[in-house]
Amino acid sequence: MKKRIIVVSAPSGGGKSVVANHILEHYKNVQFSVSATTRKMRKGEVNGKHYYFLSKEEFEEKIKENELVEYENIFSNYYGTLRSEIELAFEKQKQILFDIDVKGAYSIKKHYPEDTLLIFLKPPSLEVLKNRLINRKTETEEQLEKRIARAKMEIEMSADFDFVIVNDVLDETLKQVDDILSKFL
Ligand code: 5GP
């Protein structure tokens, strides 16, 4: 069955952006859902492309105005999906790609059960994940520990996803993603 919503979840540092970029490059009818967040912009990120970077007050205003389909507090920052991103994509007959956490993924599936495909990228081990995060050099030691603890929780919670791919060798991961998408897009 064809799906209009593809959610790719993975623990932080789990290789989501590479997979998301692959999908956006090769599937021209797929559009990225730009989330809102209160976290600080990282080097190389563009406001409106990777995220809408908001202040805490601006984000809370959006919650109040019911502009978010779902939101979570992750690592002491808000992250949320804007209703407008989904509505605009549907209007344009586009499929939409989400890079959101496991809880957010289940919320989207609950809102759009028939339309949503959930894919989880599982790190080969927590050790590998930790090394990826260390190499990324964007987190402090404390943030790193928080991300590893959350990764454990996300891996446990991912059991009900439609597909779980062990993201070890990138080419193999991308091949599995292509196999899945060829059936559902
Ligand atoms: P990062 O700070 O590394 O960009 O993202 C941290 C986590 O927040 C990742 O797991 C990412 O997928 C998740 N995330 C990003 N946007 C959203 C969103 O709109 N909703 C939810 N629930 N999680 C999000």
Image: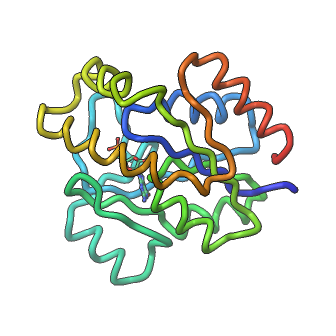
Residue 54, located in which quarter of the rendered image?
A: bottom left
Q: Residue at x 73, y 65 (%)?
A: 91
Residue 20, located in which quarter of the rendered image?
A: top right
Quadrant in which the N terminus appears: bottom right
Nearest the eye: 78 or 174: 174
- Seen in the picture, residue 3 relative to 62 is either above or below; the reply is above
Q: Residue at x 21, y 44 (%)?
A: 146
Q: Residue at x 47, y 51 (%)?
A: 100
Q: Residue at x 67, y 29 (%)?
A: 25
Please state if 24 lies on the left or on the right of 38 as rendered. right
Q: Is residue 96 visible?
A: no
- Seen in the picture, residue 14 relative to 119 is either above or below; the reply is above
Please state if 42 lies on the left or on the right of 98 as rendered. left
- Seen in the picture, residue 172 relative to 49 is either above or below; the reply is above
Nearest the eye: 49 or 142: 142
Q: How is the image coloured?
A: rainbow
Q: Is residue 177 visible?
A: yes
Please state if 57 lies on the left or on the right of 120 as rendered. left
